[in-house]
Image (cartoon, rainbow, N blue to C red):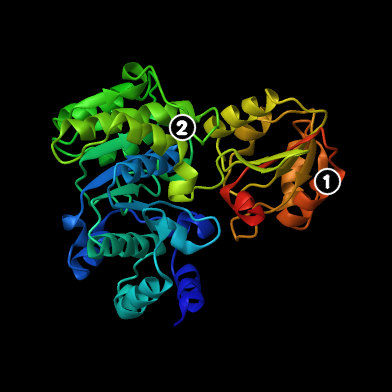
Amino acid sequence: MNYQETTAWMFNQLPMYQLQGASAYKKDLTNTHLLINHLGNPHTNLKCIHVAGTNGKGSTSHMLASILQEAGYKVGLYTSPHLKDYRERIKINGTEIAEDFVCDFINSNKVFFESNDISFFEMSVGLAFAYFAKEKVDIAIIEVGMGGRLDATNIITPLVSVITNIGLDHTQFLGNNLESVAFEKAGIIKPGIPVVIGEYTPETQPVFLAKAKENNSKIYFASDIISNVYPSDLIGDYQIHNKKTVLQTIAILNEGKEYEIKPENIQSGLLNVVKNTGLQGRWQQLGESPKVICDTAHNKEGLKIVLNQIQNEKFDTLHIVLGVVNDKDLDEILPLFPKKAIYYFCKPNIPRGLDAQILKQKAASFKLNGEVYNSVSEAYNKAIHNASKTDFIYIGGSTFVVAEIL
């Protein structure tokens, strides 16, 4: 199979949470251990930082990678989901994995994957570990897919575990209160391995403290320790929390003898995240006059900060291109959106996308008014057409909406 056929097979044949939702969720790590043994346990040769959290884990992972690259290290970066091309998930020093490597890996293991019902995410994790081990990276930043305790990435013993924050997302899998979600994320805390917590609440802090104590792990609450941060090319308001998390994580790495990361590496790393890693979709500006911003925030905690940042912008009329997936709690997120805006409702082009007509009807009950469009691009083009130079256009609600206009 060529690259297009290979990735099509991966997406279509196997459970993929991003597209299918609940049916793709695995209840334990049995399959992951089976797969990684089959691959010769490549993860045992890797030095890793493991990053979990409801929001900010992608930005945090990319910031860490950028800083370590600036310090001269060969850095593997595994994140999800991708926006345009599957290979975005697996990079070394900002360069995506080669198409040939993906094809060879899938083709040579396809029979095993099929006979053992290996999921899309499990094979992706296996591919990343195999690639990073073969390329002998100095360090790998591994972002959790969802949750932590039962995530396929949770077979590693990292140098540091990182949990950015806890919010209510994927509640059908992780629990419908903050304590339950925190318990799942805290599942990445390993015996004797330090853990950095980005943000905490009265509900989540006891969960983290208990898990750290159980594992004899030193715990660091970055928001309490770090006061000064450096500027970054990632300018979303929410990045202040991620930067504190990153600085505390780097401080722990510097305590060991293996890595030396200087202040100038941190400064240049934070200023060049996009250039060094290729990160997209984080308060990303796509146009000027009118100003056009897209952002992948898609749950209450993430959207609250982004929508607040929009209100601090100067504009005449606000245009919002909005689409969501069908398991989103609309009663939780729609009240956050401003009533004084023109809405362009659309459906992201995936099976999990919520019908735009349903979104429009639900939004109307919160006095959010606009029209339905047949596609994300049609909605976006109409917003561009309607907006004057002094207006503001925001595209968001789902990672998949943003992916379609990049």
In the image shown, does 341 or 25 lie closer to the viewer?
341
Q: Residue at x 55, y 37 (%)?
A: 299
Residue type, label 2: Gly
Q: Is residue 197 visible?
A: no
The residue indicated by pointer 1 is 371
Residue 295 spot, x, y in % from top left: 60, 41
Q: Residue at x 69, y 24 (%)?
A: 311
The residue indicated by pointer 2 is 167
Q: Is residue 173 visible?
A: yes
At mark 2, the secondary structure is loop
Residue 339 spot, x, y in % from top left: 77, 28
Determine the CA span between mark 1 and mark 2. 31 Å
Is residue 240 shown left or right of residue 401?
A: left
In the image shown, does 227 or 58 lie closer to the viewer?
227
Ranked by sequence position, the earlier of labels 1 and 2 is: 2
In the image shown, does 227 or 35 lie closer to the viewer?
227
Give the position of the N terminus as an image quadrant: bottom left
Density class for disc 1 (Cα within 10 Å; few <14, some 14-19, many ≥20) is few
Image height check: is 329 above or below 81? above
Q: Residue at x 50, y 73 (%)?
A: 8
Give the position of the C terminus as an image quadrant: bottom right
Density class for disc 2 (Cα within 10 Å; few <14, some 14-19, many ≥20) is many
Residue type, label 1: Glu
At mark 1, the secondary structure is strand
